[in-house]
Amino acid sequence: MPENQKTVAVALGTFDGLHCAHKKVLKAALNANAPDGAVCVTFETPPCKSGGLLLQPELKKQMLYEMGLKKVISLNFWAVRNLSAEEFLNLLKNRYHAGILCCGYDYTFGKNAAGNTEILARYCRENGLSAKIIEPVILNGAPVSSTAIRKYIENGEPKKAAALLGRPFLFEAAVTRGDRRGRTIGFPTINQRLPAGMTVPRFGVYASRCTVNGESYLGVTNFGIRPTYQLKIPRAETFLIDYEGDLYEKHLRLELLDFRRPEKKFDSLDALKAAIDRDTKAIKMGDYSEFDFRP
């Protein structure tokens, strides 16, 4: 590599969810003091997806830049899937000027995932690069993993998912028009579709939080098909506590904080209203400071 060509620290991984263990890899790259900063080499979508996404790709990219990455390089898996392990590492070294490679202990790469951290470390030694292999992050006796987080979300355990993510499970989506039935019982809701490909939360009622114009509001969110007035496609219907205003067509971030109860079919609008009123009072009195995570 020419002497005047700067090198970068490269964080390697799919980073689906940007959970606690992912952040440790990324911080290793950011703290490596590489001459030309830190970049992330990831994939547009997970190459071996065993379930839904934990974070929308555009949000993942935004959060990576917020962490301080100089550049986020999203590779198309199908374009590089036939590269051997060595060819993939050569790509990082020659095209992206990698001088330091940072990855998790279980990182694999190259055709048929034949490359592992042992091969990566040896390549670095032989080619004048540095390798930083990050050991697993253990919480509650098990390594933090995207698989465990998906299971918690699907089982209606958002608090446990948040502990591993380092933030609540969230998504951003446009507010669409519903049937406006909530307005007739004093609980107008915003309606949002779960973005395509995302992990589907357990159907039920959640304590939630929504950001509107930079302000956070607690909410009562029913996610699912709404048994009393059935929907064909599941969606989130959220009553924002202490908020007044029209939010149609706004693009809002919704966080699921705590699971309160499964979906239930009510015999009347009055019964539905009473249930939402109970949920609202309980959520309003709740303490959600544990969800105020810091980077």
Image (spheres, rainbow, N blue to C red):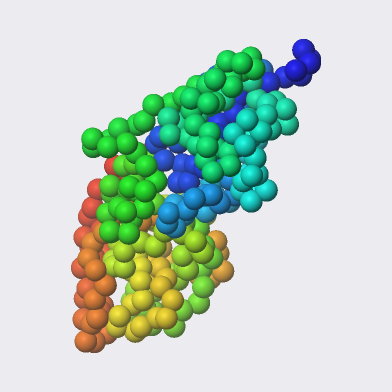
Q: Position of residue 240 (x, y in %)?
A: 38, 64
Q: Is residue 23 left or right of residue 174?
A: left
Which residue extends farthest top? 3
Q: Position of residue 118 (x, y in %)?
A: 48, 25
Q: Position of residue 162 (x, y in %)?
A: 34, 46
Residue sitting at 27 percent across and 37 percent down? 142
Q: Quadrant of residue 164?
A: top left
Residue sitting at 29 percent across and 66 percent down? 205
**Residue 107 visible, this angle:** yes
Number of marks in the rendered image: 0
Up/down of 90 relative to 147, above or below: above
| Foreground of the two, 196 or 261 | 196
Which residue extends farthest bottom? 268
Up/down of 99 relative to 46, above or below: above
Up/down of 287 relative to 268, above or below: above
Residue sitting at 47 percent across and 53 percent down? 49
Q: Position of residue 146 (x, y in %)?
A: 39, 46
Residue sitting at 35 percent across and 61 percent down? 201
